Amino acid sequence: MQGRSTQSSGRNRQVDDREAVEERYRLDTQIWLTALLATLFASVCATGAWARGWLNRDGALAAFLLGWLVYFAGTWGASFTLLFFFVTASAWSALAEGSGPGSGLDHNAGPNPDTVASPDHGAAAGDGPAPARHQKPVRNPRPARDPSPALKPSPRRNARQVLANGLVAALACLAGHIARTLSPSLTRPDLVAVAAWVAFTAALAEATADTWASELGRRFGGRPRRLTDFRPVPPGTSGAISPVGTLAALAGASLLTLVSVELALAGLFPFLPAPAFAIVAGKAAVSASVSGFAGTLVDSWLGSRWQAVYHCDHCGVDTEKAFHRCGKSARLYRGLHWLDNDMVNLLSTVFATVLGLVSVFPFFTKL
Ligand SMILES: [Zn+2]
């Protein structure tokens, strides 16, 4: 090649080489800049959430990693969508916890304020004196206490809870980013990009809907019923549903999707070309929000049918944890031992994502 090239084409090649090098440096700079901004964004959010008491230390670390990944792969569009979930979820949790006695609803003695306000998930779980569903009443030393705190996580979230809600969305975002960098070799890059957006949005819509439903349902929902047999159960019970909670889930899934759609139409998802997205934005939004809402039903079904419930024989109470806070280990008497509340949340976001992806492919012939 080199021998045959003329002087002028050699000069052209030099120019091409220089442009290629410049382009590479430009891309390098862009990547480093994005990484730097991701670090800034994630540290501000994680530190802020920790300082406000929304997360414990592990939770803040997990939030930092997820926030970094989401910003790096999806910049402002994905980050603001994630923030919408995170801020509303934390705010409703604070509201529900702050007004603790409200969750006592049918229980005359009212909850123990220490239990309700307990900042640590581990300590709060099964902290209670509280009885719960399925509990044998004769064994309960203090039957009048509010049952909900024993079965519900308190607002300071740990790493498992953060990952259970956000990991799938972050991975979807990463998939979109990777697909974008491979897009020249993909046959339908726009379809893949929209699918990644639907996966990301459906996962966060599920997490949002579920959190809104449980927090607002617990506060305002009255006596919920178990999804499997519609029997009334104490507020805060896993897998329980109420009309208020269901409406809150619908609102949460729809609003999060709306936020994500607007950001995508504004071109703020770097892996998603806005003109291509605009063609299918309506369908994509329905896909994501319906999948997110359906995910909450799966969440309730798993929670009421399969989630592990333990019984502490020492205290005579039910708990969602294998170790009761009294120090004794509780025995599993219902559900699958590996399926705790966080696993239920994780599986529900996986379900929402898969449903979203399945719903995308038959309909998106235009991309
Ligand atoms: Zn105990």
Image (cartoon, rainbow, N blue to C red):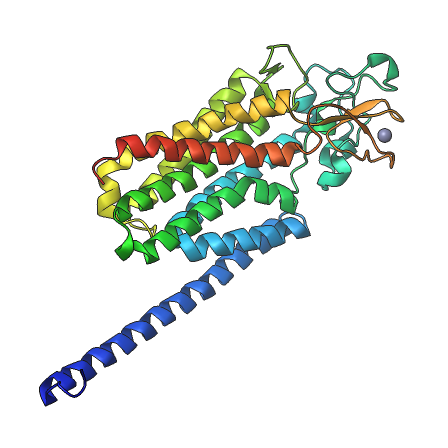
- The C terminus, quarter of image: top left
Q: 173 or 326, which lies in front? A: 173
Looking at the picture, how far across and down is residue 221, in whole percent? 58, 19
Looking at the picture, how far across and down is residue 123, in whole percent? 77, 39
- The N terminus, quarter of image: bottom left
Q: Residue at x 31, y 49 (%)?
A: 272
Residue 167 position (above or below residue 41): above
The answer to whether residue 240 of the structure is visible from this angle is yes
Q: 245 or 68, which lies in front? A: 68
Residue 186 position (above or below residue 277): below
Give left or right: position of 1 versus 52: left
**Quarter location, residue 284:** top left
Give left or right: position of 2 versus 57: left
Looking at the picture, how far across and down is residue 159, in whole percent? 64, 47
**Quarter location, residue 324:** top right
The answer to whether residue 53 of the structure is visible from this angle is no
Q: Residue at x 59, y 44 (%)?
A: 162
Ligand 1 sits in quadrant: top right
Q: Residue at x 65, y 20 (%)?
A: 235
Give left or right: position of 231 versus 186: right
Looking at the picture, how far across and down is residue 228, in whole percent? 59, 14
**Quarter location, residue 116:** top right
